[in-house]
Amino acid sequence: MDLLVDGGLVARTYTDRTGAFRFDAVPPGRYVVEFTRIGHRGRIEDVTLVAGRLHTLAVALAPLAFTVNPVIITASRTEQTALDAPASVSVIETPAIEQTNALTAVEHIATVAAVDYAQTGITQHEIVVRGFNNVASGALLALSDYRYISVPSLRINVFNFIPVTNDDLARIEVVRGPGSALYGPNSANGVLHVLSRTPFEDRGGVVSLTGGTAPLVQGAVRYANTIGDHVGIKLSAQYLRGEDWQYVDPVEQSNRAGAIAGGADPDTLLVGARDSLVERLAGELRLDWRPTARTELVTTVGVNDAIRNVDLTPLGAAQVQDWRYFYVQSRLRHGRLFAQAFINLSDAADTYLLRNGNTVQDKSYMVVAQAQHGTVVGSRTGLTYGIDLQSTVPRTSGTITGRHEEDDTINELGAYLHADVTLSPLLQLVAAARVDLHNRLEDPVFSPRAALVYRATPTQTLRLTYNRAFSTPNTNNLFLDLFADSVRAPTGVTLPYAVRVQGVPETGYTFARDCGGLCMRSPFTPASAGSPGDYIPLDATLLWGPLVDTLQSFGIDISAIPAPTSAQVGTVLGRLDISGAVPVYVPVADVSDIPSLKPTITNTVELGYSGLFGEWLSVGVDLYHTWKTDFVSAEQVETPNAFFDAPSLAGYLDDFMPVDTAQYLAGLIAQVPVGTVSPREALDPWDIIITYRNFGKITLWGADLDVAAFLSRSWAVRGTYSWVSRNQFAVVSAAGRPDTIPLNAAANKGSLALLYRHDRLGLSGEVRGRAVEGYPVMSGVYQGDVASYGVMDLALAYRLPIRADILVSLDALNLLDHVHQEFVGAPEIGRLVTLRVRAAF
């Protein structure tokens, strides 16, 4: 709470858990006292303080449409106001959450500045901050009540696995910019923190029922109470079932038709067997113990069962079937000591990939332990320091990490120190440093942070920050060993090549060049040239004999034609492109070795301004410059195949047959790969490898704007705009290979919302629009363009005058039914209207 005189801040303090507070060294006089709680505010005018007298104040806190200077915890891992934070932060608070029929927690951040929000289903999303989105992305560090939410071994954020109900949400904080100096790996672009309500501050029960036009139904319940003065208990649960928007994947349909033509039973065939229903069941049980006002122990058990839905992966869509996500967490707070331990467990059950029908077995888990403490040094310096340990243990029964299953555990250890130094009444220095160790990386990673926060007035802050952050290679990058597909000839015949997605070993991948040049391996190698697993020169003519035998089996006899030499018929290289409905080969001239993977380093310099103008206007502006090094690419084919050169082969054959026949036959032969340029470290000698590699430097500029204003005590308006200097980057890999890295997000996007809240009438509402500029996408098998789109949403809520404990709310997502696609491979999004009845008891 704040003590004010003539609008100026005299003193600030915080209550303890019982509501008691005190101001020290405040002279007697007349003051204004402001009380602030998350999402609420109260004010008492003309409070006269008399020396030596204890004053008791009672205040009613009113909910706000939004708070102009909220209290946050995520930016510095400690409590502070948004104005004081050395980072750009947005907060979605309880009043805004209550009036929206969100099916998942992350729907509340769709219009937050810098958030790249792509809806891929009625409950599915791909979300990052400041770009570099992907299917199955884990680029954004996402927390729920201080716990990582990502799926353990896959390290992907599946936001509809968060079991917290909408009625149990207290607030959501979004920190823009790198956070590794405090949070460690994989927070290079920002942090999302979902915080639930406590059983002490929010007692009682809530039941809600939602119906929608999908058709859709969702039911949720929350109950919290205390046992005596020191124990609180909370239970929440929800169930959802709805029809998702439809999407037809041409690759799935083609593969399914081919399998059925080959004799597969359509009733049991998993390839292309999509289920458009979305169904999930989730629950959470929490026990709080507060033996003293300074001590709190919270233990939480949660589970989410994704009974069915479709999610995007780099290998195409996956049909999720009973994927269960379970966690146990216990956290302790005593004064400035914070410690927690949790375990996240995953069980993919009967989930399978829709393009090939392969099952996904994942029973991985992650164990995390963290401790943090703080102290004050002198009168000007506050220190926060801590240590994080985490161990990720993939258990995939060979379906994801394959032959690496027995040696794929990742252990990480990080320690940090954060200092907040008051240089003067107007100037604050924030400095932090963190060191992280990773058992699969050779060198430790150092993450510094420095910020100058200049408070020109009590309500105007200017900050200059530098952050160095990193993202470590994940389990897939290092250990993936997954069959993706078979290779087929133009005639539809399956060839003896497999397409495999594999991680990069600690040694990297090196290509053999001791065969008089580049070497290849082939399943067709004749005994005269060695065994099929042996390297042979990159010369298709060495495989003329097997070619003759193969054509003979199809009734084409060229046995009388003598074998050509490499001087007569050339050999060309082609890299498989699997992004389209029909795989094609793209000509390449050479290959380059793939070094062992390094962490991606992100450096950001940011200039930010946050200002409050009276009680009615807040402005936030951020300008940043980011450069990334050793960017880890998305999955891409790295092993080209060898082919007969069609023109020279046709020229050779027309000495033995008519020209038209020679050209036709040469064209047919030239479409069949005769070998693969595979690295020495390949587990399968001639299979085609899709893998990862580090690329060079990416540089960009960006800006974010967030403006909010109260037009009156009931009306407010809020607008955001985000800009990035470009959405594609020409890069060169560590081995000298040029490529293009996409932002996979819009270079320009913005939102505008009009909000209304009248507590006496019990009515609230919001109309919001979101505009997103089109952008290119390259993410796994998904490549293409997302067209520019704009959507308008409507949210209305009404508290019944005769029963104030009943809230009826109506939401219309994409009100104008502007059918559009928000990510390549996702269904087109149409209008979804939901009606919710919420009853408190």
Image (cartoon, grey):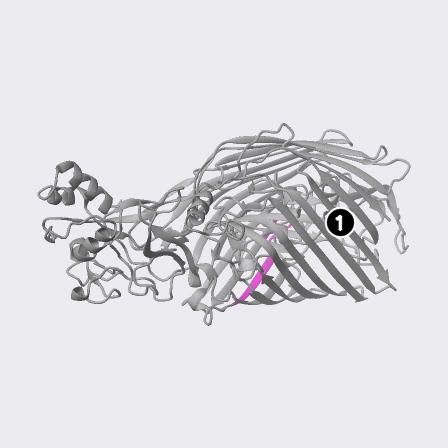
Image location of residue 109, percent across then percent down: 63, 43
- Horizontal side of 138 relative to 742 (left or right) equals right
Residue 401, position as x, y percentages in the image: 46, 64
Looking at numbered disc 1 in the image, what kind of residue is underneath it?
Answer: Ala
Residue corresponding to mark 1: 220
Image-quadrant location for residue 372: bottom right
Q: Nearer the viewer, residue 568 or 422?
A: 568
| Percent x, y of residue 665 | 20, 43
User: Magenta segment, which residues?
Assistant: 412-429
Image point (53%, 60%), residue name: 184
Where residue 154 appears, as percent x and y from the top left, is: 51, 59
- At 39% from the left edge and 42% from the top edge, which residue is drawn? 580
- Residue at 57%, 55% in the rendered image: 430
Determine whether the residue tagged by mark 1 lies in a helix, strand or loop: strand
In the foreground, 597 or 308:
308
> Is 742 rendered above or below residue 144?
above
Residue 690 appears anywhere in the view: yes
Image height check: is 434 above or below 785? below
